Image (cartoon, rainbow, N blue to C red):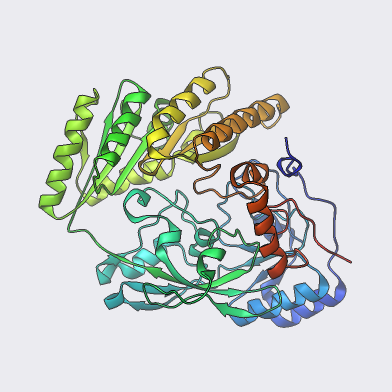
Amino acid sequence: MSAEMMVPVQRKGSHRLSEAFEKAVRELLGARWSQSESVREHHGRDESSYPPMLPDGVAFVESSEEVSTVLKLCQAHRVPVIPFGNGSSVEGHILAIEGGISLDMSRMARVLDIHAEDFTVSVQPGLSRKQLNEELRSTGLFFPIDPGADASIGGMCATAASGTNAVRYGTMRENVLALTVVLIDGRIIRTGTRARKSSAGYDLTHLFIGSEGTLGVITEITLRLHPQPEQILAASCSFPRIADAVDTVVQIIQYGMAISRVEFIDALAVQAINAYSKLDMPEQPTLFFEFAGSPAAVQEQVAIVAGLVAEAGGSDFAWAEQQEDRNRLWHARHQAYFAALQLKPGCRAMATDVCVPISRLAECVEATVADLATSAIPAPIVGHVGDGNFHLIMLIDPEQPEEWEEAERINHRLVARAIAMEGSCTGEHGIGLHKMGFLRDQAGDDAVDVMRSLKQALDPLNLMNPGKIFATQVARD
């Protein structure tokens, strides 16, 4: 196990903020600066399996200019900064392992401008995806990226988020045109324009997407929008074996089908979802589909997919044709994580994900199922299998160290399996605290050294979300 894989499980000591720093921030923000225990607790806890690690203070900022001033103060006083959106990370991104301040972006939650004729919108980072789509409803356009949590748009950029629509619309990387980013020295930069393409200089937009708050603070995002489909149908079907369900997905993708969503949930996940969301699906490996487009296109998609499902021994479709029914189905899928937690009351979840080439998906899932069969740890499997991405939700008794150790071994084998198949150690969760060692296994020493050089150039004191992606320490002297 590499040094970078030996992730911290608690905050590294206590680093008191200086009186001069506290005075300067309080003068700038007034009541929007808080050091109360409850506020710090909220900003030092996420959905990861790690214990809370509280910041020393929380700054509620309202503009790029305020962010710039706060970051300059942090650099001058060598105070770590952790950007905070909705706190929905499962990889420990928001935890203050070196202390410092949490930079809460929730008050920067406006839609700045909509250019419906250009299919673009500019937003602030604290806006959630649901809030954005509510604002867009009257335009006939929508933003498709939908991770399970109602994440903030800024957080989705920071982790290169994905979701159930990625098989058709791509991830955040394909749907962000430009960013406004504030660097630790206070400079405010714009990484692109509203134009659909540019060959002018380095691609700074994609440098910051997926950077997990380690290079700068995203304060404005320009996004691609998409037309609302003319017709949308959703359906589910079950299979006797996991292999049959996953093989069906591979065939659908290799067929070139422009399907909007295809999601996999195993029998244990179905059991959890049924109980949590009051559904009555057969407790078998299950696929959720969404078909969208013109009525003729939808009819063609349904006919082809239904044929492939039948050939694989799948059940007839259970349809969700009305919007209310579709919303209920997809809400149940998005709540799979919280549903899984109810299978083992009092547990914590170690959620992990990998992504492999679609041609290796069935092999990877089957090997993972065989591995889980040797363990007593419950671990529902769910996945955006249309793009080769799936998740384990390992349910662990927090009072049993041997369960943590067993879950780590399962996770290590899963990631090694994915990397050996030319896949990724994470499809959408990000590196955070949990997968630092795996980044080097996947990318290689030279590539990681280049990443470190970029980090050093933009954040020489390692103040931006320290200890995430790389096991580095703040320069405090």
Looking at the image, which residue is at 48% across and 24% down? Answer: 367
Residue 202 percent across, percent down from the top left: 53, 71
Residue 427 percent across, percent down from the top left: 49, 46
**Can residue 471 be seen at all in this image of the molecule?**
yes
Q: Nearer the viewer, residue 22 or 206?
A: 206
| Residue 159, picture quadrant | bottom right
Q: Nearer the viewer, residue 364 or 120?
A: 364
| Residue 194, picture quadrant | bottom left
**Can residue 29 be seen at all in this image of the molecule?**
no
Residue 4 percent across, percent down from the top left: 73, 44
Looking at the image, which residue is at 22% across and 30% down? Answer: 309
Q: Is residue 345 left or right of residue 119?
A: right
Q: How many marks?
A: 0
Looking at the image, which residue is at 49% across and 71% down? Answer: 109
Relative height, residue 160 to residue 240 (above, below): below
| Residue 228, picture quadrant | bottom left
In the picture, the quarter occupied by the N terminus is: top right
Residue 27 percent across, percent down from the top left: 75, 82
Q: Single out the residue that lies furthest toward the right.
A: 477
Q: Is residue 220 left or right of residue 333?
A: right
In the picture, the quarter occupied by the C terminus is: bottom right
Looking at the image, which residue is at 61% across and 44% down? Answer: 48
